[in-house]
Image (tube, rainbow, N blue to C red):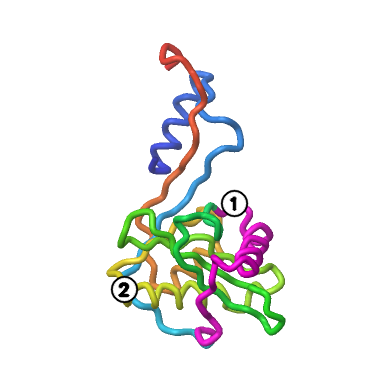
Amino acid sequence: MPRAAYESLRASLDLRGISWAHEGQGAPWDWWWTDTSPTPTPLFDKVQWLDGSEQGVASQIKELLNLASPTHWAGPENPLATRWAGIVDSSGSVVSCAAETMRIAGKPHLASVATHPDHRGQGLALAVTGWLTQQLLTEFPIVTLGMHADNDSARTVYTKLGYHCDYSWFSSGFASMPASSL
C-alpha cells in the first residue's frame, strides 16, 4: 500500500489498540523505473553475463546474496530470475551481481543487486546495474526495480543511472483479527 496510507492506517489502528501486522513483518520500499540507457562507467567492461544455472556460479551468487543482501527475494534458484549479470574478481569470485526478473513477460524488473562488503565503494553496483539496464533497454522499452526505502547507497546508484522513483510503498502481512475489532 502507499506509505502515506500505511502510516495513516497504522496510526488509526494504534489508537484502537489493534495490532494489524506481525512485529518485524513488512518494510517500506520504493519503486523505480527508467527508459533511458545510462552512460557507461569505467567499470562497464568488467561486467559480464553470469550463468545462474551453472551450479558453481549459482552457489557463488547465493553466497554473495546471503552475505550482502540477506533480504533478497530472487536467488538463482528462483524461476523468475531469468538472467544474471555481475563482476568476477581475479580469483574467479562473484563480487557484485544483479538479476533480471520477469514477473510479467516483456517487463524486466531488476532484483538482488548486491556487492560484497569488502568491495563496496568502488562503483561495482553502479557498473553492474548500469550495464544490465543498458542491455535490457536494447530489448525492452522500460526497466523497473524496487528497493528498501532506507537504502541510501542504492538510492544514490539508481539516481545516478537515471532511474526515477515514482512510488513509495509499505508491504506487510496482516494479523488475524475479527472484523468486529475494526
- Amino acid at pointer 1: Thr
Q: Is residue 174 above or below residue 28?
A: above
From this viewpoint, which residue is outermost toward the top?
180
The nearer-to-camera label among 1 and 2 is 2
Give the x, y percent position of residue 86.
55, 74
Check disc 1 and report its element: helix, strand or loop.
loop
The answer to whether residue 126 is visible is no
Magenta run includes residue 63: yes
- Separation of residues labelled 1 and 2 (CA atoms): 29 Å
- Amino acid at pointer 2: Glu
- Name the foreground residue: 13 vs 56: 56
- Name the foreground residue: 110 vs 105: 105
Give the x, y percent position of residue 2.
38, 43
- In the image: residue 24, left or right of residue 137: right
Give the x, y percent position of residue 6.
43, 37
How many numbered discs sit on the rendered protein?
A: 2
Q: Is residue 79 above or below residue 24?
A: below
Mark found first going from the N terminus, 1 or 2: 1
Check disc 1 and report the residue beneath it. 71
- Residue at image coords 69%, 68%: 117
Q: Quadrant of the C terminus?
A: top left
From this viewpoint, which residue is outermost toward the left?
141
Check disc 2 and report the residue beneath it. 139
- In the image: residue 42, left or right of residue 95: left
Give the x, y percent position of residue 92.
68, 79
User: What are the residue bounds of the magenta stretch?
Assistant: 43-72
Graded by Cα atoms within 10 Å as few (under 14), some (14 to 19) or many (20 or more), the crowding at tag 2 reads: few
- Name the foreground residue: 86 vs 155: 86
- Residue at image coords 30%, 62%: 106
Q: Quadrant of the N terminus?
A: top left
Magenta run includes residue 39: no
The answer to whether residue 158 is visible is yes
